[in-house]
Image (cartoon, coloured by chain):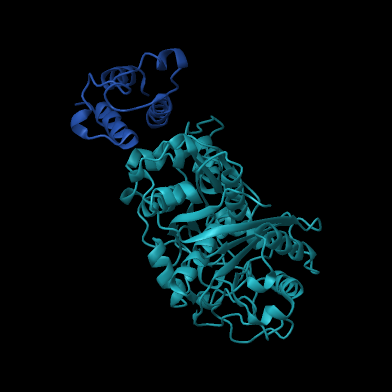
């Protein structure tokens, strides 16, 4: 798509298992830190997986007055906290922006799982009298995140949530991008959040045999591209971006992290949970993103992969990268930051876009940690940025996320 | 203050996030204590749960202040 309206990133925010602000998150990424530990949010003794990447040291009272905080599920709180950081970082409110031209498109794969679970448990334990809280539905529904972000700031532009499992927040970023390109808004708050470290979240993913069960060593459990990987590690948190039309940002003298130059979407049309082992849908999505960006594959420096540490998915994505990038594949830096953050599901695209933008800012590619025994089935001539960060001037970064349902998404940022 | 009044006050402080000093008998949930219509529904539900009563909608409509809640519950609590 050739668009006259260019879109830049003017603000970043994050609350993650590695740190509760974007700078703290970067410090964890740069130093190759694992966010995994034994689950504290519930008693996990009887679960196959008893660890996760939880956000640490988070107190709702630090951010919300008690009454307001209680009306938001944790995934919404994470969304508001990360968005507040991104909005403050952008200087948007101080610039006297026209709030009718600011929208919010957020991503969440699940929504308020804890709220759903609690209310259902409570009813089941009762005598059959319905005593559902009037805040149950507004806490649970996934769009409460975008709703709350707009209410808090008075943003009256386009507002909704995208749901495409683990691709949700790349889809939200692309939708926000398109809203600005099409002239429907000048500024969009976007990204995504998830908070599914609950009994039903962990039990459900265990039943799918999708999660690592390496309970004796949680910090080494998320190990994309390693031969001994045994599934993903559940993460939680939020990543937020302020996207802004270039001339609008320039006119107010805003700091610009990078330009968002392309977004690609495709579908595997194969299976509801398994990735297509041929990777053809993933080939298609990266081609779509490159075409939208109007660049050649050889211009890409860094790919933040979906790379969840599952036996099937990791290899299929790498095969697809080899197919799309050809000889250039070996010149790329590739890393899966999920090795550190765990898998934030519908929040993954948000925090991984933030990782790409911070990598560009700092000239440093965050590593794939726990890559000690390379999988011989995966082409190890590629640079997976194993275990330690690598200095590199990242001019163009691509971020991939894929979701159950066969949703594939890819976004591309370029330095200005 | 009766035991019921103490409990009613505690519920209001918890659910509406207000200071104990604000919870006077004349205080209106919506006009003085910052409650919206959903907060009021939640308060009524908490009273029902705590005092094991069922408050019909037409009577709940008449419970708009701290004092009205206390008198209703002192009369109906089991």
**Colour cyan, chain:** A
Residue drawn at x 69%, y 68% is A296
Residue in the picture at 38% in, 26% down: B36
Q: Is residue A336 above or below residue A275?
A: below
Residue A221 visible (yes or no): yes
Residue at 49%, 64% (x, y): give it: A357
Whether residue A36 is visible here, answered yes or no, is no
Residue nearest the viewer, comparing A374 with A23:
A23
Quadrant of res A124: top right
Count of numbered circles on the image:
0
Would residue A43 be found to the left or right of residue A306 on screen?
left
| Residue A87 at x, y percent in the picture | 40, 49
Residue visible at 79% across and 69% down?
A: A277
Image location (x, y in percent) of residue A139:
49, 40
- The one nearer the camera, A53 or A366, is A366
Q: Position of residue A86 (x, y in %)?
A: 42, 53
Write down which chain is painted blue.
B
Is A98 on the left or on the right of A414, as rendered? left
Q: Nearer the viewer, residue A382 or A214?
A: A382
Q: From what the image shows, is residue A69 above or below residue A285?
A: above
Rendered view: A264 above or below A217: above
For residue A406, side relative to residue A80 (left or right): right
Q: Which x, y percent locates residue A65?
A: 32, 42
Q: Is residue A24 left or right of residue A391?
A: left
């Amino acid at each position: 798509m050739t668009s006259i309206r260019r879109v830049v990133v003017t603000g970043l925010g994050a609350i993650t298992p590695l740190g509760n602000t974007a700078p703290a998150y970067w410090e964890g990424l740069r130093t190759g830190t694992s966010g995994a530990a034994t689950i504290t949010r519930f008693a996990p003794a009887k679960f196959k997986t008893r660890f996760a990447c939880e956000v640490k040291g988070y107190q709702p009272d630090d951010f919300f007055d008690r009454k307001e905080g209680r009306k938001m599920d944790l995934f919404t709180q994470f969304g508001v906290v990360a968005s507040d950081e991104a909005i403050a970082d952008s200087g948007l409110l101080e610039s006297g922006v026209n709030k009718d031209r600011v929208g919010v498109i957020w991503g969440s794969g699940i929504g308020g799982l804890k709220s759903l679970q609690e209310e259902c448990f409570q009813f089941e334990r009762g005598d059959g009298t319905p005593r559902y809280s009037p805040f149950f539905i507004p806490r649970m529904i996934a769009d409460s995140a975008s709703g709350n972000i707009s209410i808090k700031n008075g943003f009256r532009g386009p507002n909704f949530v995208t749901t495409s499992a683990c691709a949700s927040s790349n889809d939200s970023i692309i939708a926000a991008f398109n809203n600005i390109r099409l002239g429907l808004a000048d500024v969009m708050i976007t990204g995504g959040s998830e908070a599914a470290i609950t009994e039903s979240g962990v039990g459900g993913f265990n039943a799918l045999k999708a999660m690592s069960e390496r309970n004796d060593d949680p910090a080494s459990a998320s190990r994309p591209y390693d031969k001994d990987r045994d599934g993903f590690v559940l993460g939680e948190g939020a990543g937020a971006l302020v996207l802004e039309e270039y001339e609008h940002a320039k006119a107010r003298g805003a700091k610009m992290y990078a330009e968002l130059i392309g977004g690609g979407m495709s579908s595997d049309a194969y299976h509801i949970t398994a990735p297509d082992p041929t990777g053809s849908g993933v080939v298609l999505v990266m081609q779509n993103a490159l075409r939208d960006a109007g660049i050649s594959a050889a211009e890409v420096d860094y790919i933040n992969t979906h790379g969840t540490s599952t036996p099937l998915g990791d290899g299929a994505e790498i095969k697809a990268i080899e197919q799309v990038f050809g000889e250039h594949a070996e010149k790329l830096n590739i890393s899966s930051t999920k090795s550190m953050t765990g898998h934030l599901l519908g929040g993954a695209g948000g925090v991984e876009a933030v990782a790409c933008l911070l990598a560009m800012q700092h000239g440093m590619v965050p590593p794939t940690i726990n890559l000690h025994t390379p999988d011989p089935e995966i082409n190890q001539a590629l640079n997976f940025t194993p275990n330690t960060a690598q200095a590199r001037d990242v001019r163009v970064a691509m971020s991939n996320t894929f979701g159950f349902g066969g949703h594939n998404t890819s976004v591309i940022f370029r330095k200005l | 203050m009766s035991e019921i009044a103490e409990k009613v006050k505690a519920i209001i402080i918890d659910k509406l996030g207000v200071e104990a000093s604000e919870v006077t008998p004349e205080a209106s949930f919506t006009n003085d204590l910052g409650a919206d219509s959903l907060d009021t529904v939640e308060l009524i539900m908490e009273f029902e749960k705590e005092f094991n009563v069922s408050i019909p909608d037409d009577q709940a409509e008449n419970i708009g202040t701290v004092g009205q809640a206390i008198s209703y519950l002192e009369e109906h609590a089991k």
